[in-house]
Image: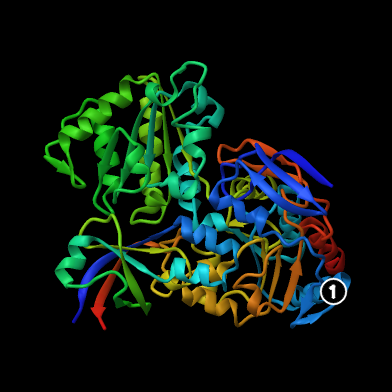
Amino acid sequence: MGENFILITGRTREQAEGLHKGKRSKAYHSATALVEMSQEDMDRLGIEEGRIVLLKTPYGQVEVPVRNGALPSGMLFIPMGPVANALIGVETGGTGMPAFKGLNVKVELT
Amino acid sequence: MRSIIENVTCTFCGCLCDDIIVEVEDSKIVRVRRVCTNGRGIFVNHDPTLRKPTVDGREVDWKEAAAETAKILSRADSPLIYGLSSTAVEAQRKAVELADRIGAIIDTTSSVCHGPSGLAMQAVGEATCTLGEVRNRADLLLFWGCNPLVSHLRHFSRYSLMPKGTLFPNGRRDRTVFVIDVRRTASAKSADHFIQVKIDSDFEVLTSLRAMVQGKEIEAETVGGVPKARLQEMAELMKTCRYGVVFFGMGLTMTRAREYNVEELFRLVTELNEYTRFSVIPMRGHGNVAGADQVLTWQSGYPFAVSFARGYPQYGPGEFSAVDLLARGEVDAALILASDPVAHFPRTASRYLERIPTIIIDPMPNLTSQSAAVVFPTACYGVDAAGTSYRMDNVPIRLRPALFSKRPTDEEVLDQIIEEVK
């Protein structure tokens, strides 16, 4: 069930602006609780912007709305923050750095 | 009466833009000019009201909060001090002093940022320069795994692409710009050349570039999704430019091979100096994360992940780094200085932080302060407190405050805590 993607996380301007309004603000939540997907993948899965999808990794799962993003097919992007972090593991390979980018994630249509 | 304070520094990111103009009326910031949208909130959302610290949600005076903090830290078998990158050098050195006194482990946000770059620096060395040199001398700029138009909004205009430098009177037209990334970012649109690499393939691309710079033949027709001919063209431009600079970000440090990616980049840049002048600068995220590296290094010999548990500093990325410690449940109290690990750590690690007594010192409430036992609402360096921060190129910048401080600084709070643990 579901389709495999590679997830990267990172900063967005909306995330940066939202955090100044408070991490419990609506602006911060809406800036970080979303997933970007390429138009090609959205067309293939038959989904439009705003559609809620379920993302699963061995470390957790989240339900987030889809937004179109400039990404290669097969890649997803979530802005850094608590939603993305529910999917990230704690293995750091002896460096202190978890894999915030390049994570295998399964996408299911709810 | 309205007063205008010039040359204020924005401490949001490692650019530390020090040309901000702040207008103040009745002790409130009413207008900010030149600041970017990422940094604007530091000024316009700043609440200078003097608030009392809290212990378990109850308002107390500053001395009582310091005494409670000392009690928590002294009772702990293995306390952690974490954060440091959004405070000034003056507070950072007090945090190291406190860690030394109580035998704590101290780690900074570097461990989830450019920690792997620190490891690479220790292994290979780093050929670097200041942003002033970039502005005045660089004719070839490469941005690898970073997206300044989202994370460092004035970098292009103040330091890299646009400025008309001493040797380059035409600014942008005199420079050649590459963006290397796994996706076509906003910054890629500003580049002359966009090189799209497959995720987790940066190491192979960097190794191939090293070989090409050395004049060796590559058998593969594509490397990491990039045609060989494009890499050959890139290698030639790198060898023949007058002054090249690579800026790099989390695209190298957070993906597979982490520090090995950066080591390979540092080797490439070092080897390019046999042909021309070349430098590399990590795009530092938090305003004073470079200062945190500096302070920890000058006081303990190591840039992050340092344990004072045995009475002398021990270095251990993976062992004494915060995510690893929290994931394994190896600390039993935490003092968080100017950071929000609950918002930025993997959930498994941040959940553990909510189970142990936590103290937070920060101008703003955040997700970590929600579950903290002790909260110190301090002044904000650069807005209502003076201090020193290190720019991404390790140039120290003196912060000129726009407002008179009503709140104690992080340094003063840490001083009180140190007095209490003595």
Is B106 placed above or below B176 here? below
Residue at figure coordinates x 26%, y 50% from the top left: B201
Q: Residue B253 appears at what percent x and percent y?
A: 41, 52
Q: Quadrant of residue A93?
A: bottom left
Left or right: where B264 falls relative to B43:
left
Q: Residue A35 appears at what percent x and percent y?
A: 34, 68
Residue at figure coordinates x 37%, y 51% from the top left: B251
Left or right: where A21 falls relative to A28:
right
**SS state under label 1:** helix
- In the rendered image, which residue does mark 1 sit on? B67
Q: Which residue is at the front of the view, B383 or B320?
A: B383
The amino acid type found where label 1 is placed reads: Ala
Q: Residue A23 appears at what percent x and percent y?
A: 57, 69
Residue at figure coordinates x 16%, y 32% from the top left: B229
Q: Which residue is at the front of the view, B152 or B209?
A: B152
Q: Residue B287 appears at what percent x and percent y?
A: 61, 49
Res B201 visible: yes
